Image (spheres, rainbow, N blue to C red):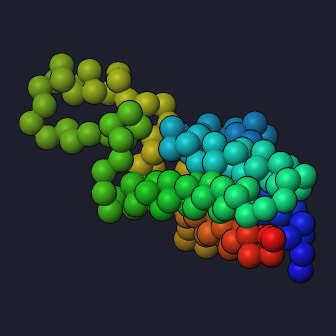
Amino acid sequence: MTRRVFVLAATAGSFALLAGAFAFQYIGGMAPCDMCLWQRWPHAAAILIGIAALAVPGRLLPFLGALAALSTAAIGAYHTGVERGWWEGPTTCTSGPTGGLTPQELLDQIMAAPLVRCDEVAWEMLGLSMASWNMIASLFLMLLWLAAMRQSR
């Protein structure tokens, strides 16, 4: 396959994942958490990189595309760990411990809690959350970008 085919496939993959995220949000009514939003930005960057890489030869843009795909995969891996309780997530979108709190402190924590929490799986398929699927798909997209880089002169 040619560099152009790999770039088109990687760009289309990021577009499809981003379109899917927006479809879940606006058609499915599933509001994203903060970490879900973080995972969207590298896909948007990869789309722009892909458009540029179709016009500009060289290895730099495919490398940046691979970096963008790896970035969203890393955020997806971190988000998966937060969802599964393997580690704590950012305090802006996860719940904190409730033991030992006074009633007023507990109420304050409840009132400050985000509407959509990062530590709850909102949707899953085959036992994997959207964050996990994003990680897997993004690692595949990274391989496409690396193949495009390899095909570059």
Q: Is residue 129 left or right of residue 101?
A: right
Inspect this view and state whether residue 130 appears.
no
Instruction: Please name the residue shown 55% across and 55% down the image.
Output: 71
The tally of labels here is 0
Residue found farthest to the bottom? 1
Rendering quarter of residue 32: top right
Where residue 63 sits: x, y (%)?
67, 62
Judge whether 75 appears above or below 90 on screen. below
Judge whether 17 appears above or below 143 on screen. above
Q: Is residue 95 left or right of residue 137?
A: left
**Nearest the eye: 18 or 23:** 18
Judge whether 122 appears above or below 114 on screen. below
Rendering quarter of residue 27: top right
Residue found farthest to the left? 100
Instruction: Please name the residue shown 70% across and 58% down the image.
Output: 60
Q: Is residue 133 left or right of residue 98?
A: right
Quadrant containing the N terminus in the rendered view? bottom right
Where residue 59 sits: x, y (%)?
73, 64
Instruction: Please name the residue shown 66% across and 67% down the image.
Output: 142
Rendering quarter of residue 98: top left
Inspect this view and state whether residue 122 appears.
yes
Judge whether 30 appears above or below 51 on screen. above
Instruction: Please name the residue shown 43% across and 57% down the image.
Output: 78
Quadrant containing the C terminus in the rendered view? bottom right
**Nearest the eye: 102 or 82:** 82
Where residue 139 sits: x, y (%)?
62, 69
Q: Is residue 145 left or right of residue 82?
A: right
Where residue 115 sits: x, y (%)?
48, 31
